Amino acid sequence: MLGKKEAAITEARRVAETSPVSKDALTGPGILLNLAVVYAWTNQVDLAFETLAPMGKIPNGIYYGQLKRDAYWEPLKHDPRYKKLLAELAPRG
């Protein structure tokens, strides 16, 4: 948002690489979510979905309500993959 697209991506990737989910199951998923947010807001939509897709299957990943309501995901909401991911995360009744 500050016009520093490449710096944002580089920093978010660096942090994700230094704290992977395999080493830190508590904060690792949150760091990956932040990386997906950076991708979404820097118009790297494919990378955002690539990062988000497995997040619904891990503890502390992304949940239906987060994806549906958080403004972080606004850049993705018009992509058909958003609706697909939302449907995968929807509560089963």
Image: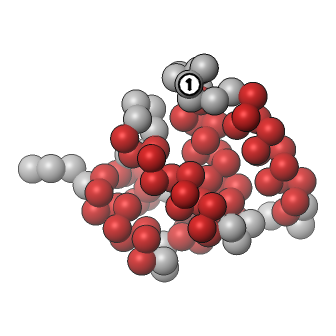
Q: Does 18 sit left or right of 71 as displayed?
A: right
Answer above or below: position of 65 versus 16.
Answer: below
Answer above or below: position of 52 versus 74.
Answer: above
| Residue depicted at x 43% and y 68% | 82
Answer above or below: position of 49 versus 54.
Answer: below
Q: Where residue 79 sits: x, y (%)?
A: 48, 77
Answer above or below: position of 92 versus 40.
Answer: above
Can residue 2 be seen in this snapshot? no
Q: Where residue 2 sits: x, y (%)?
A: 87, 62
Q: Does 90 sit left or right of 58 as displayed?
A: left
| Residue depicted at x 63% and y 30% | 20
Identify the image's colour scheme: rainbow, by chain, secondary structure or one colour. Answer: secondary structure
| Residue depicted at x 85% and y 63% | 5
Q: Where residue 28 sits: x, y (%)?
A: 59, 29
Give the position of the N terminus as an image quadrant.
bottom right
Residue to which mark 1 is pinned: 22
Bin the neighbour count of mark 1 within 10 Å (Cα to Cα): few under 14, some 14-19, many 20 and up: few
Can residue 61 be seen in this snapshot? yes
Q: Quadrant of residue 60?
A: top left
Q: Where residue 48 sits: x, y (%)?
A: 60, 60
Q: Between 56 and 91, which is closer to the camera in this rendering?
A: 56
In the structure shown, which secondary structural element does the residue marked by tag 1 occupy? loop
| Residue depicted at x 45% and y 54% | 53
Q: Between 90 and 50, which is closer to the camera in this rendering?
A: 50
